[in-house]
Amino acid sequence: MSFRKIDIKELNFNPFTKIGNEWMLITAGSGDSFNTMTASWGQLGVLWNRNVLTCYIRPNRYTFGFIEDNDCFTASFFSEQYRKALSFCGAHSGRDCDKLKETGLTAAEFDGCTAFNEADLVLVCRKLYSYDLNEKNFLTNDGIPEVFFSKDPYHKAYISEIIAAYVRD
């Protein structure tokens, strides 16, 4: 597939729909050593005069080690026809299966990072700052920790500069 690099300011979409409803694949690593996971939580915006994406990864996810060990990662967005592939990548661990073989997705390199030929949009991100979410920092008592963290560990957040954006030609 053919992609073209664009200025991030050319993008025109609703981030609430793009992330929350359509989802994204967060992929870290390169060459033959990478993993991807589906994410439906995240933010896009401006921080420290930079265009940023913030993603959240639980430390028990296989992708966590790849994010930790690499300076960059990608966020890939797909059309609805790839919903089944994204569902699979969110429900299965790369420790236990070959996600590419199972989904039919094909890996491609974008500025030294791994993403996918089938994506419509790829954001290449460079980590700037990370922090651990924890229960004591919640400012409301509306059940978020009980709903989202009763069975799983708290996420680590990665604020990352979007250093490149690619769209399918």
Image (tube, helix red, strand yellow):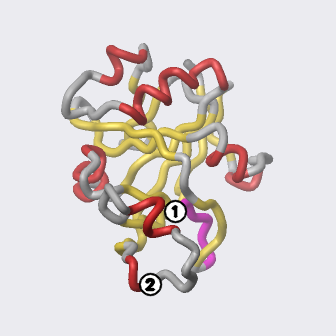
Tell me the element at label 2. helix
| Place of residue 107 in the rendered image (x, y in percent of width and height, measured from the top left) | 39, 25
Residue that carries the numbered disc 2 in the rendered image: 137
| Place of residue 50 in the rendered image (x, y in percent of width and height, measured from the top left) | 60, 71
Residue nearer the viewer, 139 or 27: 139
Q: Residue at x 38, y 54 (%)?
A: 72
Q: Amino acid at mark 1?
A: Thr
Q: State if disc 2 and disc 1 touch (CB < 8 Å).
A: no
Image position of 46 with respect to 136: above or below: above
- The Cα atoms of the two marked residues, 1 and 2, are separated by 18 Å
Image position of 141 with respect to 146: above or below: below
Residue 109 quadrant: top left
Image position of 82 with respect to 162: above or below: above
| Place of residue 129 in the rendered image (x, y in percent of width and height, measured from the top left) | 40, 73
Within 10 Å of disc 2 (Cα), the crowding (few <14, some 14-19, many 20+) is few
Tell me the element at label 1. strand
Q: Residue at x 47, y 63 (%)?
A: 160
Within 10 Å of disc 1 (Cα), the crowding (few <14, some 14-19, many 20+) is many
Q: Residue at x 36, y 61 (%)?
A: 150
Q: Which mark is residue 62?
A: none
N-terminal-most mark, 1 or 2: 1
Q: Quadrant of the C terminus?
A: top right
Point out the frontmost of discs 1 and 2: 2
User: Does residue 108 belong to the magenta stretch?
Assistant: no
Residue that carries the numbered disc 1 in the rendered image: 54
Q: Residue at x 54, y 40 (%)?
A: 24
Q: Amino acid at mark 2?
A: Asn
